[in-house]
């Protein structure tokens, strides 16, 4: 099980990490809205490996059968490995490569409030909120926790769906024998 989890988790994590590294430097040109769409699309695509990892485990390790619970465990562990890779990559980007990211995001968030026609009080409140968030986000543990919450729910959903689709209580050859025996007795 460990080999399957690490293989598929690391491939998933590498994909999401490489895409993060590839598009984030261009966030000024892409824009934060499109950046979020690209980011979450990448995360969804990377978590397709949860499905393939569970299927590989079922077919190659578990002899063709797997319960929902076991499939869920395999899938959630693949998700955790992938999320750890994603968080590690973001920590490096945020603290080493793009230390001005929080300033850029604060500027974007305040511009959105201004563009909505909000009052000066609302704009100032948003600016204060972003300053407080930036102060908390500069703490690596808080940063890692918030970053983990970006991909994890998607991985959890992919795990539940994949476990439900791939569960198989009996091996295919046992089903054929059962069907054949039922036909003979009928």
Image (cartoon, grey):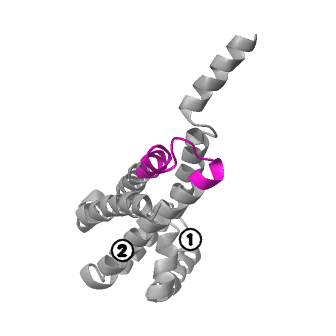
Residue at the image position 57 percent from the left and 36 percent from the top: 171
Left or right: 84, with 19 as reference point? right
Residue 173 colored in magenta in the image: no
Quarter residue 11 falls in? bottom left
| Span colored in magenta | 49-71
Where is residue 96 drawn, in percent x and y? 27, 84
Q: In this view, does 33 lie above or below 174?
A: below
Observer-nearest of 62 and 186: 186
Number of residues whose C-alpha sits closer than 10 Å to that of mark 1, classed few (under 14), some (14–19) or many (20 or more): few
Question: Dot 1 corresponds to which residue?
Answer: 119
Q: Which of marks 2 and 1 is nearer the N terminus?
A: 2
* Residue 113 position within the rendered picture, expressed as x and y whole percent measured from the top left: 50, 66
Query: At numbered mark 1, what does the secondary structure look like: helix, strand or loop?
Result: loop
Q: Mark 2 points at which residue?
A: 90
Query: Is 56 in the magenta?
Result: yes
In the rendered image, the vertical position of residue 44 relative to residue 78, given as above or below:
above
In the rendered image, residue 165, in percent from the top left (x then y), is placed at 57, 39
Residue neighbourhood size for the residue with mark 2, other residues' Cα within 10 Å, grouped as few (<14), some (14–19), many (≥20): many
* Picture residue at 43% right of the left edge, 87% below the top: 138
Residue depicted at 51% across the width and 84% down the height: 142
């Amino acid at each position: 099980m460990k080999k399957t989890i690490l293989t598929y988790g690391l491939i998933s994590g590498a994909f999401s990490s490489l895409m993060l590294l590839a598009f984030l430097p261009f966030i000024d040109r892409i824009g934060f809205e499109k950046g979020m769409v690209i980011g979450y699309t990448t995360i969804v695509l990377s978590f397709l490996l949860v499905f393939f990892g569970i299927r590989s485990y079922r077919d190659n390790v578990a002899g063709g059968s797997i319960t929902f619970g076991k499939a869920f465990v395999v899938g959630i562990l693949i998700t955790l490995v992938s999320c750890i890779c994603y968080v590690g990559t973001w920590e490096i980007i945020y603290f080493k490569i793009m230390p001005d990211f929080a300033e850029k995001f604060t500027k974007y968030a305040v511009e959105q409030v201004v563009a909505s026609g909000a009052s000066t009080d609302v704009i100032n409140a948003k600016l204060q909120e972003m300053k407080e968030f930036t102060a908390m986000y500069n703490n690596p543990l808080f940063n890692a926790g918030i970053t983990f919450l970006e991909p994890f729910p998607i991985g959890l959903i992919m795990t539940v769906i994949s476990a439900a689709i791939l569960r198989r209580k009996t091996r295919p050859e046992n089903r054929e024998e059962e069907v054949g025996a039922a036909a003979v007795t009928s």
